[in-house]
């Protein structure tokens, strides 16, 4: 099992930037990919993006492509979500997740085996 802890959330004005971190511990050698999701009040959990753990290949949701960037530091077992040009609609609790096996789709929450506790991001207009 992999344990995940997110950090870096907070309040930012529209157009601003935040960087979230997700520190992994435990059986990290078995991780195939790390994903980021978000959930706004009253809405379903939404895929933000994913990064392959070994090759670092990334994929993003249309709503954040070009504004958000996922990176990883394998030595630190940490994944980052850099969020630029933020919009009020980016307001949500952001979660990182770890998948133990390769999947045909990374956009579904069911593809992931471990989840962090989430960190709140609020973008004011």
Image (cartoon, rainbow, N blue to C red):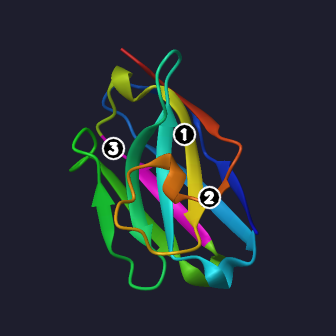
Name the disc covering residue 84, or none. 3
Q: Nearer the viewer, residue 94 or 115?
A: 115
Above-or-below relation of 13 to 98: above
Name the disc covering residue 22, or none. 2
Q: Does residue 44 appear to the left or right of 78 in the view shown?
A: left
Q: Which of the two discs, 2 and 1, labels the residue nearer the N terminus?
A: 2
Q: Does residue 72 appear to the left or right of 75 in the view shown?
A: left
Tag 2 secondary structure = strand
Write the start and end of the magenta stretch as one range: 78-84
- Magenta region includes residue 38: no
At a point 35% along the width and 60% down the height, the residue shown is: 105
For the residues labelled 3 and 2, say whether their Cβ atoms are less than 8 Å apart: no
At a point 39% along the width and 59% down the height, the residue shown is: 106
At a point 54% along the width and 50% down the height, the residue shown is: 20
Q: Which of the two discs, 3 and 2, labels the residue nearer the N terminus?
A: 2
Residue on which disc 1 sits:
94
Q: Position of residue 107 (x, y in %)?
A: 38, 51
- The quadrant in which residue 21 appears is bottom right
Q: Which of the two discs, 3 and 1, labels the residue nearer the N terminus?
A: 3
Above-or-below relation of 54 to 83: below
Closer to the eye: label 3 or 2: 2
Tag 1 secondary structure = strand
Above-or-below relation of 55 to 5: below
Q: Position of residue 120 (x, y in %)?
A: 60, 31
- The quadrant in which residue 11 appears is top right
Q: Which quarter of the image is occupied by the C terminus?
A: top left
Closer to the eye: label 3 or 1: 1
Q: How crowded is mark 1: few (under 14 residues within 10 Å), some or many (20 or more)?
A: many
At a point 53% along the width and 17% down the height, the residue shown is: 41
């Amino acid at each position: 099992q992999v344990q995940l802890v997110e950090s870096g959330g907070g309040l930012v004005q529209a157009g601003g930037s935040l960087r979230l971190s997700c520190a992994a511990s435990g059986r990290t050698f078995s991780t195939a990919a790390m994903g980021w999701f978000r959930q706004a009040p009253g809405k379903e959990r939404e895929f933000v993006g994913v990064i392959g753990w070994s090759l670092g290949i990334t994929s993003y949701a249309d709503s954040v492509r070009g504004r958000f960037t996922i990176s990883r530091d394998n030595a630190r077992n940490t994944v980052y979500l850099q969020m630029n040009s933020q919009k009020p609609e980016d307001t949500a609790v952001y979660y990182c997740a770890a998948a133990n096996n390769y999947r045909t789709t990374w956009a579904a929450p069911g593809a992931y085996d471990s989840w962090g506790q989430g960190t709140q991001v609020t973008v004011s207009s």
